[in-house]
Amino acid sequence: MKHKGLFITLEGVEGAGKTTQVHRLANAIGENVLVTREPGGTPISEQIRNIFLTDADMSPSTELLLIAAARAQHVTERILPALNAGRIVICDRFSDATIAYQGYRKGIALQQIEKVNHIATGGLAPDVTFLLDLPPEIGIQRKRNSGEPLSRLEHEKLTSHQKVREGYLAVAKAEPHRVILIDAQLDENTIHQLLVSETKKRIQSFE
Ligand code: TMP
């Protein structure tokens, strides 16, 4: 799908440091940036996020359809208008998360994920994705150390988190031109500088 902007996503297992990097990157890039997240980013999508993160015993298909509903609203109401206006959109998670979480972790067939993702995005894909890769046991430990309460997904067994990581690595392998794999055990400033330099390269090429 053609647009005038730059669509950047950050992905990774729980505790990989995405959210910190999203905000640092946005500050470094400056104006003309929209920072957003999934699930979420619009009033409807944020309501769906609350249901998604808090309700226990959710079936895998329910997860997939809720995520897709949140994404459809987010793409239409926020992401596409910003991209069409030539803005830089930095989104904390997007479609790759559905492949990793609902596909690899929850076992929904990848072809089904692809179809549903297509309905939700209308074919919109990130121009670049930064995948912050980390052994999940370190990510969960980081979350615990931060003192924040863990969500229902973060509470799941380590093997589930390992599947998520495996899913993300498979996406990175399949799409090496789009997905930049970053070792999330590097220090925060080094990761930040890497993200800024890769983003600036892409801004120059679309200006
Ligand atoms: P966050 O903690 O990075 O804000 O993400 C919220 C949770 O939602 C996280 O556990 C991953 C999960 N998630 C999915 O399961 N599928 C998706 O497609 C997305 C975007 C998030």
Image: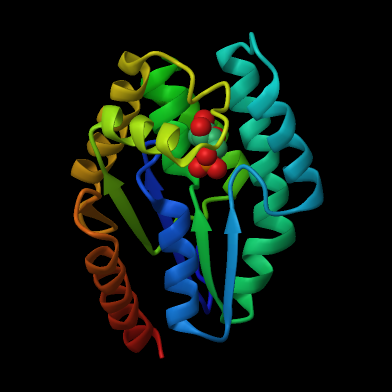
Answer whether residue 2 is visible to the viewer in this image.
yes
| Rendering quarter of residue 75 | bottom right
Answer whether residue 115 is visible to the viewer in this image.
no
* 21 with respect to 40 (left or right): left
| Rendering quarter of residue 101 | top left
Of residues 49 and 19, the one nearer the viewer is 19
* 36 with respect to 42 (left or right): left
Q: Residue at x 50, y 47 (%)?
A: 94
Name the spot of residue 89 as percent of width and height, x first.
54, 68
Chosen colour scheme: rainbow
Name the spot of residue 182 as percent of width and height, x first.
22, 54
Q: Residue at x 51, y 85 (%)?
A: 30
- Image height of 57 relative to 11, above or below: above
Of residues 202 and 93, the one nearer the viewer is 93
Of residues 101 and 194, the one nearer the viewer is 194
Total labels: the figure holds 0
Name the spot of residue 48 as percent of width and height, x first.
74, 35
Q: Residue at x 50, y 66 (%)?
A: 23
Name the spot of residue 4 as percent of width and height, x first.
52, 79
Quadrant of the frame with the C terminus: bottom left
* 49 with respect to 187 (left or right): right
Q: Residue at x 30, y 37 (%)?
A: 168
- Image height of 107 relative to 190, above or below: above
* 122 with respect to 27 (left or right): right
